[in-house]
Image: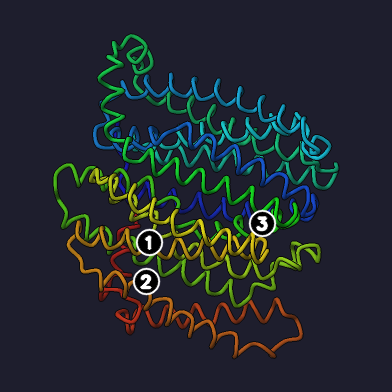
Amino acid sequence: MKIDSLSLRYSYKVFGNVVSALVNLVVLAFVPKALGPAQYGLFIYLQQIFGQIVSLLDLSTSGAIFVKLSANNNRLELLKWMAIYLSLIFVVLIIISFVFGLIKSSTSEPKIIGHHLVFLGALLAFSTYLATCVSGILDALAETVLLEKVKLSVKLFMLVCLVYVLYFEEITLTLYFIYQIAFFIFVVAIGSIAFLIKAPKDFLSGIRSMSVEYKPLSREIYIFASPLVIHTVVGGIVVIFDIWLLKNTANIDQLGVYGVAIAISQVPMFLVTPMIPLLTREFSALAQKERFSEMSRLFDSLVTPCYIIVTFICICGVFYSEMTLTFLGEKYAFGLTAITVVLIYPILQTMTQISMVILLSVGDTSHVRTITIYGAIFGLPLSLIFLYVYGYGAVGLIIKILAVNLLVVNMLLFRVSKIIGKSYKSMLALQLQPMFFISITVMMGKFATSDLFDNFIFNSILGGLISFFLLCSMAFVVPHWLALKNFSIIKVIKKLKF
């Protein structure tokens, strides 16, 4: 099969994620407001709990398969192994959801969390995981363009369905669960069918007839993933504990605010999210050939500009966070601080995710495990202090997450700097310089327009445009202020042409 270029695949990824970000904004503007903090908080509670259970059951095997398939597209036996493992996860998850429902029935919560909601939460977690696996496989096989076309079509269709429900029906928690599940199931079904139509005629029959030695293959996957098992288990347990602690020390409304805040924080990641599977493929291929200097150049040409754009969006969000209440309504006014603080999270997540990709691509899973353990040890007392002792609710949990990510990202970058031949000092400058100068440009934009119009939204939009103009000018005139190399922006623009 013909492999599309990196620039073409990334362009489709970015376009798809821009549309997804806009659709997610529409969903955020209506669904949390329609459900209310309590019902939306219940959705977040079940989504997070079962999502982490699935992550624990995965045991980092999917990541191992994506990396190995990216490095060698001919290893189709990995797909057969994964199909069996997915079936096992589904069976175990259904059993866990049944037990979870029985436990809730024996407490005072069955009136709040019904059996059907528990089952829908489990089904949503599995459908999300299944869609992630299918997307990872298609990205590993360089079928990103096909994948993004499918996701975009399904996303727009589901948006039309949601708008219809919002205007002509009353949206309920059950209906919203079904809406989310349907989206992921459609992506899996249509994406798989579209790929099989495009693939060689003997592709599927070849996999079926393929003789797979499961024991040595399982051992190979285990050797790669075993250091990450601790990373997955520790991370999953920490998230489940934090959600449980937030629910029991605050109230379900705080969970709703936390869910809205985290959802908003994912919007600025529209440039980074599409880059992760593509970089996994490219870095894995380069690492296999030990071309570390090219890995460093790829880091400079794509990662740095994306980090700057994400940082700009996040800093604007911090200064203009009051705009969110225009869409969410006064029901969420008590959570404005949490929404403001969480916008720092994508800045840290950008470098965290990309650093993880580089370490996994070179097989340095032991450092990922060690750093995760350090982060968990550092974060546990913070959870107890902010949630149990002081009862800060959603704000406390978000501050804890930021503190842990700040530690983890710098430990990861220290290790990455050794691999791609950069100094940790340059990595530190990459984080701090853009944040400092972008903050200045955003402050200047807000100061220039704060009293220009009587309408706060008009002032915010104009201030953001002025800040963006100042940032672009800075990138071209004094790029080193933003930790950019000379003309790197122009190079990126040229690379994205296709």
Circle 2 sits in a helix, a strand or a loop, which is it? helix
Vertical arrangement, residue 169 with respect to residue 307, above or below: above
Label 3 to label 1: alpha-carbon separation: 24 Å
The percent coordinates of residue 299 (x first, y second) are: 28, 60
Give the residue number, with chain letter if any, for mark 3: 260
Give the residue number, with chain letter if any, for mark 2: 431
Mark 3 or 1, which is nearer the eye?
1
Q: Nearer the viewer, residue 56 or 83?
A: 56
- At label 3, counting other C-alpha atoms closer than 10 Å, the crowd grade (few under 14, some 14-19, many 20 or more) is many
The percent coordinates of residue 442 (x first, y second) are: 53, 81
Name which of mark 1 and mark 2 comes first in the sequence. 1
- Res 409 label: 1
The percent coordinates of residue 187 (x first, y second) are: 55, 33
Name which of mark 3 and mark 1 comes first in the sequence. 3
Circle 3 sits in a helix, a strand or a loop, which is it? helix
Residue 205: image quadrant is: top left
Q: Nearer the viewer, residue 149 or 185?
A: 185
